[in-house]
Amino acid sequence: MVNSGTKRSSRHITSSKENIPLNRKRFNTRVRPKKQYEVPVQELGCDLLSESGSSEEENLEITPCVPSEANESLLLKAPRVLQNSQRDNILVDLALQTIKRPSKRDVSQHDTASYPEIPHNDTDFFSSLSDEMILRIFHWLPKFTLAKCARVCRRWNCVVGDRSLWKRIDLANRRVTSSCLGLLLHRGVQVLRLTKTEVTEDGFDGYWKGDKTGFQYLQYLDLSLSSASTRIMGHLFTSCQNLKKLSLELCTIDDNVATLFGQNPNLQVLNLSMCEGLSTTGLAAILGGCRRLTSLNLAWTGLRRQSVAYLSVCLPSSVRKLNLSGCRENITDEEVLQLVRACPGLMELDLSDSTVITEQSISHIMSHLDKLQYLALSRCYRLPVTSIRELSCHPSLAEVEVFGMFRDGTMERLKNEMRNVELNRYPFSSVARPTTGIRMTSLWGLRVRDNAV
C-alpha cells in the first residue's frame, strides 16, 4: 500500500491555476488571447473591476459594474456576468439598433432614380398596331398570361375576350369554381378537359343566368374522375346542348342529369364507364334523345336486367362501338340476339364478364355482325373452346380478347389454330374513352394544352 502521508513525486506536482503538471511539455495547448473590452464595455456604460488580486481572482470572469448614470434600457439588458458569446451578442444587438431604416419615401425615390425616365413625347408603338395584329400576338401566349393581359387596359380586355383564344382549355387536376367555369364557357370554349378536377360552388351564378351564347360552342367535354356535383352538372348540361363527345367516367349522376345531357341531338360519343346513379329512366332519356350515337361505353355501370333488355331493343342503329362489360348475369343469349339485330353495323363489341352467355351468343354474332373487327369475351366462363375456335371463320374479325378463360397450353393451341385472328392484345377497352395509351394531353385526338413559349 502507498502511504498517504508521503509526498508526491515532482512529476505529479500540478499548478493550482491550470491543474496541469509543471514538468509536462504543453503540446497542443490552445492559448486564447485576451480580448480588449475597454472600449465596448465603456460604450455599455459599465466599468471593469481591478485586475490586481490573488490567483483566485484571476480565474474569475470580468464582471462589469453598472454606474448609476447608465441608461435604463441598458440596465434591463445587461447581465451581471457576461460570457464571451454574450458580449458578442450584445455588441451585435447594439449595432443593429443603431441602423437607420429608410422610409418609404426614400425607397420610392431610390427606385425611381435607378430606372431611366421615359420621355412623355415618345411614341407607343404597341398602340399603333391593329387589333388583328395584337390578337395574332396573343395567340402565342398561355392562358394564365392572357388573364393578366386582360387587366392592362380596356382595349386589351376586349382583344383577350376574343373566342379564338379560348377554344381549347385544359384544367385537369385543378380546383375550379363554378363562376370561373361559367366565365370560360361564356368566352366560347370548344374543347374542355376537366379530368380529376374539383369543381366547387362559390355562390355566383351570373354567368349561368345571363347571356348563354358562348355556352353553345362547347362540343368536347371530359369530366372523368371529377368531383362536380349534380347541381353543377345540371347547370352545365342545361346551357350546353351542342355536345358531340362527352365522358363522365367514374362520376355520380341522377335521372335529371341524364335527361339533360340526353337533350344533345348531335352527341356521337358517350363514355359512362363505372358511372353511378344510372337507372332505366335515365337510360331511356339518353337513348331517346341521342339518336346519332356511334360509340357508347356502359361498362360496370350496374345495369339491371330490365335496363339491359331495354338497351338491346332501343339502341340506335348508328352505334359502331359498344362496351357492355360487367353486366354479369343480367345479359343473356336473348339480349345478345336483340342487340345484334338492332345494330347490325357494329365493328367493336365488348361483352367481358358476362357469365351467363353461351355458344348461342357466338352463333348470333357470327350470323348478324358481318363488319365486326374487335370482340372481347374475357371471363365469359360458359363459352367452350370450340366456340372461340369458330371465330376464326369470321370474314372481318381481326382481334379477340379471352383473358382469364383458358390455361397457357390451351391458349398456345388457339393461337396456332387461329392464325388470322390476334388473341389477347388489349387488356382494357378503349371504346368512347377520351384518352388512350400515351396521349394524355389530348381529347379524342384533339390537343388541349398550350405550346411552350
Image (tube, helix red, strand yellow):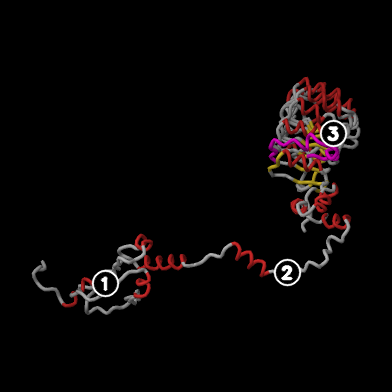
Q: Quadrant of the N terminus?
A: bottom left
Q: Amino acid at mark 3?
A: Gln
For label 2, the residue is: 117
Q: Position of residue 160 (x, y in %)?
A: 81, 51
Query: Which amino acid, by three-letter code, is at mark 2?
Result: Glu
Marks 1 and 3 sit apart, C-alpha to C-alpha, by 93 Å
Question: What residue is shown at x 37% (from left), y 66% (from top)?
Answer: 85
62 sits left or right of 349 in the view: left
Q: Quadrant of the C terminus?
A: bottom right
Q: CA distance from mark 3 to mark 2?
A: 55 Å
Q: Nearer the viewer, mark 1 or mark 3?
A: 1
Q: Is residue 362 magenta?
A: no
Task: Select label 1 or label 2 by which is in front.
Answer: 2
Circle nearer the N terminus (3, 2): 2
Other residues around mark 2 within 10 Å, as few (<14) / some (14–19) / many (≥20): few
| Residue 111: image location, x then y, percent | 65, 66
**Quick one: SS at disc 1?**
loop
SS under mark 2: loop
In the image shown, does 58 or 67 lie closer to the viewer?
67
Give the number of the disc on residue 241.
3
Relative to 154, say whether 246 is above or below. Answer: above
Amino acid carrying mark 1 in the image: Leu
* Residues at marks 1 and 2, CA–CA distance in whole angstroms: 61 Å
Q: Secondary structure at mark 3?
A: loop
Q: Which residues are magenta?
A: 197-221
Is 20 on the left-hand or right-hand side of 357? left
Label 1: which residue?
49
